[in-house]
Image (tube, rainbow, N blue to C red):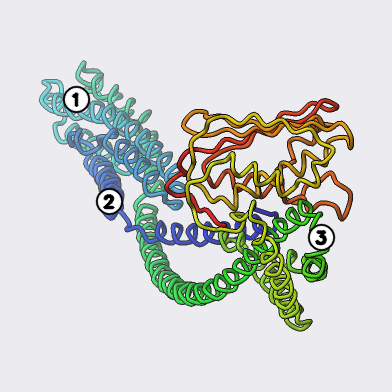
Amino acid sequence: MNRVEFSQNALVGLVVAVMLGVLAFLYNKTQAVDLGEQNEVMRLLSEVKEIDTRWDLEVQRLQDNPRSATDRDGVRVNTGDKALRDITRFAQLTNSKMLSGGLTELRATIQQKSDWVQQFKDEQGKNKIALQNVMDGIKQLKLAPAAQKNSHAEVSQSLNLIEESVLTYVVEGKENQALALHAATQELQKSAVGKLPQADMLMQGVEALLANVPSQHALFAKLATLTTGPRLTSMNMAFNNELEKALQEKELYRIYLVYYAAALLVLLGYLGVKLKSANQTLEHRVEERTRDLSNALMHLKESEAQLIQSEKMSSLGQMVAGVAHEINTPLAYVKNSLGRVSEQMPNILEVVATFEHLLAQLKAGNDSQGLSDTFQKATSMLGSLKQHHALDELDGLVKDGLFGTQQVAEIVSNLKDFSRLDRSKVTHFNLNDGLNSTLMLGKHLLKSVSIDKQFGDIPEITCSPSQINQVFLNLVTNAVQAMPDERGALVLTTKAEADGVAVVVQDNGKGIPPEVIKKIFDPFFTTKEIGKGTGLGLSISFKIVQQHGGNIKVESKPGVGTKFTVWLPLNPPADAHLEG
């Protein structure tokens, strides 16, 4: 994958990730609100408001009726604190900014009010005890004997004044009332009744009230100004508004999600249609290009077959130099034709290479731009070939070459010792006969070569004689060309070996360097001078032996010689494709 493809794929992946992310975001935003938690928060707010109201009523009741008992359950502080803790917890669950921002101040206010309520109760309790002492003192003084001896009306009036003043002062707590109460007690002390022991209880109660009532009224005034009811009502309304806004927002996101999902479905449908169309177009193009490539490959195989045939004829031409004057004219046809073919081959090979590249891109299927460029290039090259009538010219040259080879075939058919060379049928064949025919045909090349035939008693094998004779012809020709002119020695050995027959062609030539021996079976590889070798002889021989299910081994030492060992099975494989 090149950098452009990687960038395109990364961009597509990023777009898909963003689209999925938007879908997930919208889905998350449309999740239903937990109304249970919301209702619990509202219930707890109402509970706190109810507790605050009960506190206010309790304080007012104690203030208006100083002798009434304290309602312990009515002002339970920890109940309000627990409700506030629960609200704080639910505020975190509901992620309510309004609750989170207002609860801290509300909780501080409730705590302050609970402290003041407790202080008020303490002050009111002490004043209640003092008031009770005053009332008991007045009652006892009225019944005291000393009071009976004195003017009963006067004492009773003085005590009634104190009783009325003390009740009014405890309830209202005004300064002039405190002065009046103090003056009345002073007058009582001056009288004979004031000297009684019962008067001490009254005086102590009055002094306690004069000292503590102002504190009680001050706390009552603070509590009157520290009201949380409106604040709780405001928070409740704000929370309801926040909840309603959240529900509206989720409904809005739900609409967004519906439209977004619909757009995605439309996009997917569009992409599906485009993909189907692209697949149909691609299939059509693949069929056309496959057909074109098949034709090109067929022409390539035909060209390859012509090259192989040319190699065969070239080998025959070298071996039958003694009869060159008889085949000079047909060989001229072949030479001229192949020369022109050689000139056209680079263009054909370039076309083939382009189509091979196109096939590779078709198999990969991930570079539409590259595939289009290669297809345009291949189309242009084919058009150029057609414009210059290269294929027509090649066809004519091939026909000329075929005409020449037909004449050569007629001449060769007259060589009785090599009469099997062009037979394409597969039959039983003795490899010793093939070697003898090859030596007889190349007799003029072997005049200065010492030949040592070490033929063994070998069985016949099933093969294509013409192909096997071509292998022997090529190996003998190469051996002769590698040996010195006057002291060449050629050893031919045949022997039965491992359900087959082995043929050894050994010479005392110059040998093959190690770096070259790896390439000798490669097509078109040759160490001969330009024009003296095609580089196809050993390649074709290797292919023929391989098709028969055999193998070729080569051993060579530079300056000593080379040994080729050809092993062929008695019967070729069932899937062997033997051609004459």
User: Residue at (39%, 53%) from the top-left corner?
Assistant: 231
The quarter of the rendered structure image containing the C terminus is bottom right
Mark 3 or 1, closer to the camera: 3
Indicate which disc, 3 or 1, sits on the residue closer to the N terminus: 1
The span from disc 2 to disc 3 (Cα, nearest Å) is 124 Å
Residue 141, horizontal then vertical, whole percent: 16, 25
Relative to 247, is 52 above or below?
Answer: above
| Residue 553, horizontal then vertical, whole percent | 65, 33
The tag earlier along the polypeptide, 2 or 3, is: 2
From the viewer's perspective, is residue 110 above or below residue 292? above
Q: Which mark is residue 324?
A: 3
Q: Nearest to the eye among marks 1 and 2: give it.
A: 2
**Going by the picture, which residue comes out furthest to the top?**
197
Please report whichever mark, 1 or 2, sits nearer to the chain's N-terminal start: 2
Q: Position of residue 453 (x, y in %)?
A: 67, 32
Q: Tell me the amino acid under the disc marked 2.
A: Ser
Viewer-nearest residue: 365 or 92:
365
Mark 1, other Cα within 10 Å: few <14 / some 14–19 / many ≥20: many
Q: Nearer the viewer, residue 69 or 283?
A: 283
Residue visible at 37% across and 45% down in the picture: 93
Residue 342 visible in this rendered orientation of the protein: no
Q: Is residue 450 left or right of residue 236?
A: right
Q: Which label sits on residue 137?
A: 1
Mark sitting on residue 46:
2
Q: CA distance from mark 1 to mark 2?
A: 46 Å
Residue type at mark 1? Answer: Gly
Amino acid type indicated by mark 3: Ala
Q: Quadrant of residue 61?
A: top left
